[in-house]
Image (tube, rainbow, N blue to C red):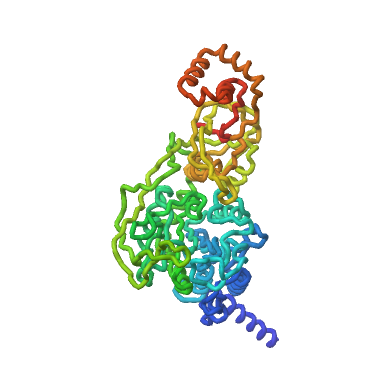
Amino acid sequence: MVHKLLCALVVSFLTGIANAQETLPLLDKNKFVTPYEGSGKKRTATYTQCVAWYQTIQRQFPKICRLDSIGLSDGGSPIYVFRINSNGGSAKVKVLINNNIHPGEPEGTDASMLLVREMLLDQGNEAIMGVIDLHIICQYNVDGSQTQSCYNRANQNGPENQGFRGNARNLDLNRDFIKADSRNARAFAQYFAAHKFNFFIDHHTSNGADYQYTLTYFHTRPEKLLPQLRPLLQSVESYLKPELAKAGWPSAPYVETMKTVPDSGIHAFWETGRYATGYAALHHCIGYTVETHMLKPFPKRVEATLDFMRVFLRGVAKEHGMALGVRDYLKRAQTRRLQGRQVEYIAHEMDVSRWDTLLFEGFEFGYRTSTVTGQKRLYYDTTKPWSRNIRYYRYFKPTDSVVMPRFYILPWAWGEVYERLKMNRIEMKQVGQDTAMALRVSFINGYETVKTPYEGHYLHYNVQTSDTLLPVKIRKGDWLIPVTQANYQFLAATLEPRAPDSYFVWNFFDAVLQQKEGFSDYVWDDKAAEILAANPVLKKKFLDKKAGDKAFAADAWAQWMYVYRSSPYYEPTHNRYPVYRVD
């Protein structure tokens, strides 16, 4: 009996220790040394090392930590997300951190592991963990992370091993969020839309100019956010910059130079939905892209990335109440329809007539003769640092807008578009029976296309459209998409053909651009003459065009086509954009 009681006490004591490990700090960090530290801070964690390390942490803290696959990469490897969610509950700010979208830029991988260990083992993080539900994508571009070389980044100062920018299909995943060609992007979209994150961080290493800063970053453009989210962004940003400076990391906006060097001024980055933070904004999530400088030592870049996350999480925790208030608003907005004919701006350009003055820390530059080409080449003199005011162009003005409908109608035939809307949690319902309706229809009047493939597509741009009201046959099974206060920005960005990252721009509707029927000239010439004779108005327009356009007058085929396209024989669906609007 005494023996059984003693065993019970021992089991109880050991169980208590195991449970205490979930909430009390473990002082011995040697058990959780990261691969980065184990290499003397010379190498980044490989995919296998990264997953194994997080598995160790999960086993140690099974009640508050989870490591789950959100899907497979294009190469067939699991994409893992590590989550810390102590004390459960839904009244928490949701933060997602993304690493290795470009695996040659791996600071986030190693800094996130250090952050996780610190959050779980060190005193003083309880308040942050109590209000933040933290999700970390360990290595998003798994395939590129597994393509290791010391030669993948020609301009970069370490680490000794670097992943490759493209995934298994050679796609740049930071151009794939809207078009979602990759399995990675589709897994990301489903996870992102399901969790409705408040904040998002995407980790990168810069390319381009040289300057003194180790750390630069940019955030979602305020113009891309609902008005209700802008004060939250402003509050976090006002906390972030001075606290980073206190931590020893003076920072600047991500450096996009107006000309060749920062002396010419820098400008803000306008991120459309193909990019991580632009995509996040379409889901009402405030995004940050961290860019550490390629030429600074790798350990310094990891340290700066870690400090950014530390300060950022403190700032987010400070605004916990405001973030939850925004979430409540968005929940109500999910089903609230737009009022009136709301105008949505779908394209912007930089306003070069406006700028701010920014105190910037750079290096003197000059030109010397290249030993390779014999021509003049740029160099930065890092022995001559400077601090001076430069122009920062951060204002944008709208250049195009659309009137949002009450509903969009997507024909069932366009399944690839439906699948992308579905994975982004856009609510749709199917039409119950065949019907005919008068709908607002767009025709594609003009567009240009890139000459070489861009991320697997021949991207359109400078799209021109015209709208008209037409009777349209709607079939049973077509998709009716209500436009609400929560989804209208996503729908405008993807379904309005002139939007710079629309599904039309990404070639999902290219079939409508090809004319399917035609004519033989020797047959059509007689019919064309009959049509002109029967239609005096058309005949006058035709003759006026011949008289005023020499090229047209000399081109018989153009004249036949002019009559054909003005006749009942011309197919009504050519260049007709197959997403319709109910106003």
Q: Which image quarter: residue 535?
A: top right
Which residue occupies 53% across, 31% down? 443
Estimate the x, y position of residue 215 in percent, counting from the top left.
41, 66
Is 309 located above or below residue 504 in the figure? Answer: below
Q: Is residue 165 visible?
A: yes
> In the shown orientation, is residue 341 left or right of residue 176?
left
As drawn, the residue found furthest toward the front would be 374
Given residues 514 and 202, the one toward you in this image is 514
Which residue occupies 48% across, 72% down? 298
Given residues 50 and 298, the one toward you in this image is 298
Check the picture and name the quadrant holding the N terminus.
Answer: bottom right
Estimate the x, y position of residue 24 in percent, counting from the top left.
51, 76
Which residue occupies 60% across, 39% down? 510
Estimate the x, y position of residue 525 in percent, counting from the top left.
62, 18
As drawn, the residue found furthest toward the bottom would be 2
> In the shown orientation, is residue 122 left or right of residue 54?
left
User: How many numbered marks are there?
Assistant: 0
Q: Is residue 496 visible?
A: no
Given residues 439 and 466, the one toward you in this image is 466
Is 520 located above or below residue 108 in the figure? Answer: above
> In the shown orientation, is residue 372 left or right of residue 148?
left
Estimate the x, y position of residue 235 in percent, counting from the top left.
37, 58
Is 96 located above or below residue 525 in the figure? Answer: below
Which residue occupies 47% across, 74% down? 299
